[in-house]
Image (cartoon, rainbow, N blue to C red):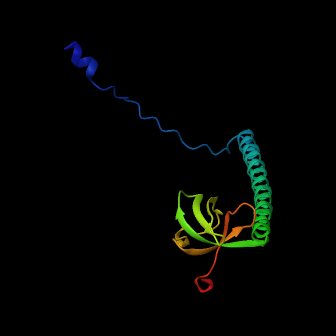
Amino acid sequence: MAAAAVMAPLVNTKMEVEAPSSASPPSNDLYQEMKTMERQLEFVELQEEYLKDEMRHLQRELLCAKEEIRRIQSVPLVIGQFNEMIDANYGIVSSTAGSNYYVRILSTLDPEMLKPNTSIALHRHSHSVVDILPPESD
């Protein structure tokens, strides 16, 4: 019987309901909430400014990278034939002089277009594949 008494749920027989007070909440709480929100706003504005600066910086880097690609592709180029893709960055090509080279492939080129016997443009000194020539040039 003692165990049953322990297991019985405790019921609060008093039904107290707090009436809403007619007085407004303490102004100190509202002031604290406003200050907290102002700090959050300042933080978000700071983050926004940082992200805008970062975007400007990345856009400048993109322009520099595109200019570098144009510079690499503007060197007098050698015509060659693509033989085989080794991995995502390297392949085997043959130049018009008849030599075969294991070369780097410019990352901006579409690897799907590099099929055996495709005409390509090679960098004059490094023999890297810098462009894929249109099929009409064959």
Tell me residue 85's x, y (percent).
Answer: 53, 62
Viewed as shown, does residue 39 lie left or right of 25?
Answer: right
Tell me what residue is drawn at x 25 percent, y 18 percent.
5
Q: Classify the position of the N terminus by image quarter.
A: top left
Tell me what residue is drawn at x 52 percent, y 39 percent.
18
Specify the farthest residue to the top.
Answer: 2
Q: Classify the position of the C terminus by image quarter.
A: bottom right
Viewed as shown, does residue 72 lie left or right of 103?
Answer: right
Quadrant for residue 64, please give it. Answer: bottom right
Is 48 situated above or below 95? above
Quadrant for residue 137, please give it. Answer: bottom right
Judge by depth and name the residue closer to the eye, 54 or 4.
54
Judge by depth and name the residue closer to the eye, 112 or 8.
112
Is 133 situated above or below 122? below
Judge by depth and name the residue closer to the eye, 43 or 92.
92
Tell me residue 109's x, y (percent).
Answer: 62, 68
Judge by depth and name the residue closer to the eye, 60 or 138.
138
Specify the farthest residue to the front.
Answer: 98
Viewed as shown, does residue 49 lie left or right of 33?
Answer: right
Is 136 situated above or below 35? below
Tell me residue 128's x, y (percent).
Answer: 68, 63
Is 81 situated above or below 32? below
Tell me what residue is drawn at x 48 percent, y 38 percent.
17
Tell me residue 99's x, y (percent).
Answer: 63, 64
